[in-house]
Amino acid sequence: MTLAPLLGDTVRLVSLSTDHADALFPSASDPEVWRWMPRPRPGTVAETRTMLDRMTADPARRCFAVQRRGDDAVIGSTSLYDIDLAEARTEVGATWFDRSCWGGPYNAESKLLLFAHAFEELGLVRLALRTDNLNERSQRALARLGLVYEGTLRSHMRRQDGTRRDSLYYSLLASEWPAVRETLRDRIAAKTPPRRGGDGQRRDR
């Protein structure tokens, strides 16, 4: 399924395809980027293409590549998965970004666009995210956004090194979305440098 682009100020989310394999391979093959991902890290462009093919073939997923609007570079990917329209719920995952983009506005704006798509376009009432119990950075980030910790699935899945991971679940409801939307907008504004006008002077967004 080809998805309509989701447009932000710093990124656009475009329908993910195997054509993005070359652009996504450098980040997907980076051990630090892939550290907390439950699926095997691709070692070649061909393996990346196979991974993307499997992701996009799943009818319960909506998969996006993240394009930086300044230069159209593909800097990452993010997805809705386990979409259940009858129960109006989904999970968010398969999210990664090139390490050079960490700390910028890109992840926050991607979440803003994806969450808005889920609540405002698909009409969902619940989305969830899960994270490794050792990934304290992710846990802090989700809590700061205002997502609610729901509980831990013990020994939920196997890590790539063979150890067992507990998965912490966080959720966001449609009634909570307006407050989280404003938090994301504030975070994006704080991380985005002011634009410069034609006279070279800085302009606030």
Image (spheres, rainbow, N blue to C red):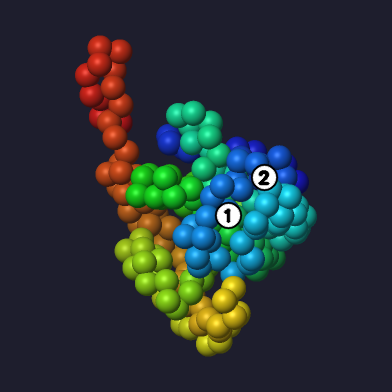
The number of callouts visible is 2
Of the pair 16 and 90, the residue shown nearer to us:
16
What type is the residue that disc 2 sits on?
A: Ala
**Mark 2: secondary structure:** helix
Query: In the rendered view, would you say 165 is above or below 195?
Result: below
Residue 92 visible in this rendered orientation of the protein: no
Location of residue 14 by image quarter: top right
Location of residue 105 by image quarter: top left
Query: In the rendered view, would you say 192 is above or below 196?
Result: below
Of the pair 80 and 40, the residue shown nearer to us:
40
Answer with left or right where residue 132 lies relative to residue 179: right
Furthest residue in direction bottom, as rendered: 154
The residue under the point 48% across, 32% down is 69
Answer with left or right where residue 189 lies relative to residue 45: left
The image shows residue 101 at horizontal and vertical percentages of 42, 45
Decide: few, some or many residues near mark 1? Use Cα within 10 Å; few <14, some 14-19, many ≥20.
Answer: some
Location of residue 18 by image quarter: top right
Query: Mark 1 sits on what residue?
Result: 29
**Mark 1: secondary structure:** loop
The residue under the point 33% across, 53% down is 183
Of the pair 162 and 187, the residue shown nearer to us:
162
The residue mark sitting in front, 2 or 1, is 1
Query: Mark 2 sits on what residue?
Result: 21
Furthest residue in direction top, as rendered: 199
How far apart are the two marked residues, 2 and 1, measured between alpha carbons? 11 Å
Of the pair 189 and 164, the residue shown nearer to us:
164
The residue under the point 64% across, 51% down is 63
The image shows residue 165 at horizontal and vertical percentages of 53, 81
Q: Earlier in the sequence, mark 2 or mark 1?
A: 2
What type is the residue that disc 1 sits on?
A: Ser
Answer with left or right where residue 123 lies relative to residue 18: left
The image shows residue 132 at horizontal and vertical percentages of 48, 74
